[in-house]
Each structure stands twice: as structure tokens, then as C-alpha cells.
Amino acid sequence: MIIKITPQTLDGTIHVPASKSMTHRELIASALAKGSSTLRNVTMSKDIEATIRILRQFGAVIDVEKGEKETLIHVTGGLKKQEGTIIADAGESGSTLRFLIPIGIYSGNRVQWTGHGRLSERPLTPYYDLFDEKGIAYQAESGGLPLTVEGKWEGGLFELPGNVSSQFFTGILFILPLLAGGSALESTTEVESEGYINMTIDTMRKRNIALTLRRAGHYEVFGPQEYEAADTAVEGDYSQAAFWLAAGLSGGTVKLTGLTRNSRQGDRAILDILIRMNAFLAFEHDDIIAVESQTEGTVIDARDCPDLVPVLAALASVSKGKTEIVNAARVRLKESDRLHAMAVELNKIGAKVEETKDGLIIEGVPALTGGTVSSWNDHRIAMALAAISPRCKDSLIIEGAEVVAKSYPGFWDDFASISRIPPEVIKE
């Protein structure tokens, strides 16, 4: 799909989609629980569909109820050993793959993991090292996908590097309470993206799981414990809210509803970063209003909020002065090399962006030229570029615009809802 956006002032209210990160976690906890759980205020996407698909293959019963006002997901937990080899297709979802690999082993099944896009290029070495240590049989093709895994977890010490991805920690944390005896998860490096691990711990504790953070990067769990079923609402997603905050600051007034002010989401860091950038944000209880501002450059440490890099790079390109994004090397291993993709596409439309080994140096310009850009088959690239369209002199044409369906299928409809001139689909 190719979409043409006419530069304009954006004005209106967006109800922020449910957190994709939280939905993955709630689905997994529900599948591991005994009894029936209901998730409310769910936003469906390709990544969430991938997690549902695989949890069903492992034996959970999952029904999606799409109502007029909200989508509910009903989950009856209980994983079962199936006959033969399960072919588990994680789509392009790194969260689905890394969260569910340990759970597939716990289910007792022989699982062959597959995926699409760049998923096979994203690192799994921390699991391979753990499999070798724990005696888990696996076979990886060229170090990536397809990956076939079969074995049995035993309690004890689990060691993972904390500077590759917090997703490995989430996958292991979910299964530790189900193992007999005491277990510990220890980071062999400084932990990055700790906010995402905290989200997992919060989800587990809501399901009556007891675990202890003994010291930084060291988690202790005694088992076996049982996850409790629950009826819970999924809060709004700060990583998706970030695009609308940037859109309002670039040109207009955008009000966001559906968020939780005291959220433990790591991407809630967007608020502190934007305030440092001199953004005008107003707060009405849990709602946030972003008003057109002359934002200013700053130093952004992306260690704990890597998913915010594309949108912050976009906003920095039209901010006053210099912005440095640092500690962002891991975002080169996402759906695209996000540092390179943002540098290339922003420079196409008049920005001044320089890549470094682990970040970007951005000299802000008053306005962008507009023109044709590519999404790089990456949902966050497409949405980040759209967010700064008010600062373009001419139309912004985004190729590969359909990729937003990975995390936010309603993005273009929401964009149209706050536009005088809706985005024009010029090629399906």
C-alpha cells in the first residue's frame, strides 16, 4: 500500500490502542493458569494473533469476542502434549518467538519454530547457550529459523545476558514458578530494558505468583506455584501513544485517552523525554494533550526504551538544535535496522541525520521537504514518518504503509479521524 499524506494541522482525540506488550503477557499468564480468564479492551494485531495461534497449538482454549465497543479474549488455560511436531509460526513477532520458546518446552511438545521477514535474523544465542547448559535438545538452521526444540526444564540457576533483549528474561520468568524447588534467573551483564521485565513481574504477581528481586538482575522464584485465572483490562500502549504525541507536537492539538498515568510500561519514558525537549503537554487525569511546540534537542539514552527510537528520531529532525540518541545499537536488530532506516528516510526529505555505531546525531531543521519514503517493512518506521508530516512543505508519500497492521491495524483510520484531509491511498 502507498499512502499520500497532505501536510496539515492535526486536531482531535485518539483512544490509544491496548498495550501490545501487556496483551502478550496477559495471554501467556492466562494460558498457564487453571480456569478461565477474560482480557478486556484488547487491540488485535498480527503479533497478538501469532501469540494466540501458538498458545492454541499448545492446548489453551482461546476465543476472541469482537463487540461493538471493545474486543474481549476468553482464555481457558492448560497446556497439553500434542502428537508429533508442532509447527509454530511466530509471523514477524520477536516477542511471540522469544516469550513462547521456553513455554513450548514446558508444554512437553516438540516444536519447530518458523517466522517471516527479519525474524530469522534476530538473535537467539542466549537461548542456545541455556539449552546447552540445561540439556535441552535443539536444532537451528544456519543459527536462526526454523528452530526445533524439545526437552524438559528442571529448576535451578538460569543465566542470561541482560544486554541482548529483555524478551529472553520474560520467557524464562514465566516458566520458573511452574518448576519444582527453588530457581533463580541471573543476568550476566548489566540489565537493559528493565522496564519490560518489570511489566512481566507485575503480570505474574497479579496472577498470585511470588518472586523476589534479590539484587539488580537477579530474580528468585520458589515452586511449584499456580497462575490464577483473572478478569483484567489491558491498559493503553505508551509506545503507540508516542506517535500521536509527536504528531500533536509537530503541528496541532491531539488528546490521548485510554492511558494509565502510573503505568509500569518502559515506554512511559516518552513523557519525561518529551518534557526535556520542551514539549507542551497537558494532563487531565489519565488523558494527555500534546500541543504544537518548538521542541528542542537533547541527549536520549535508548537503553531502556529502544522502541521509542524511530519516533524520537523523527521528532528530533524538526526540533531546535542537536539531538543525540545513544545506547541504541540493539534497534539495528528489529524488523529493520531502525537506525539506518530512519537516517536514510529522514535525510531523503531534508533532515540532517548522521548514524553512529550505537545511535544517531540529528541537527534539527525548521521544516522538511516532503516526498516519497519507504517503511522498510517496519511498522514503527511508517508511523514515525507519518507523525511528522505536519512539518513537511509538500505531501509525504509512504510506501509499504500496510505494515502498520503488525501492531496497530487502525492507525490510518485514526490518522484520518484527526485530519481535515484524510490520508489518500494511491495504491493498494
Image (spheres, helix red, strand yellow):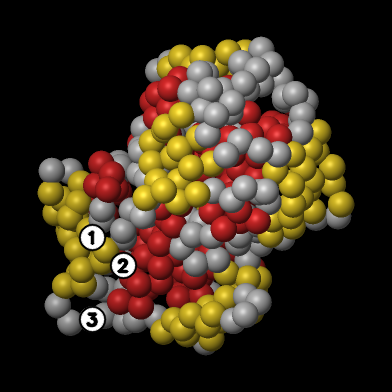
**What residue type is disc 2 on?**
Gly
Look at mark 2 in the image and give the residue it sits on. Answer: 104
Horizontal side, residue 291 vs residue 312: left or right: right
Q: Sequence order check: which comes first, mark 3 or mark 1?
A: 3
Going from N to C along the chain, the mark reached first, 3 or 2, is 3
- Residue that badge 3 annotates: 82
The percent coordinates of residue 404 (x first, y second) are: 45, 52
Of circles 3 and 1, the one toward us is 1
Dividing the picture into quarters, in which one does residue 17 lie?
bottom right
Query: Can residue 31 be seen here?
Result: yes
Which of the marked residues, 2 or 1, is nearer the chain's N terminus?
2
Q: Amino acid at mark 3?
A: Gln
Is 109 placed above or below 128 here? Answer: below
**Residue in the image at 45% along x and 76% along y:** 31
Does any portion of residue 302 appear in the rendered image? no
State the image coordinates of residue 298 (x, y, percent, origin top left).
66, 19
Residue that label 1 marks? 113
**Local crowd at mark 2 within 10 Å, few (<14), some, or many (≥20)?**
many
* Position of residue 263 in the picture relative to residue 137 (left or right): right
Residue 327 as seen in the image, left or right of residue 420: left
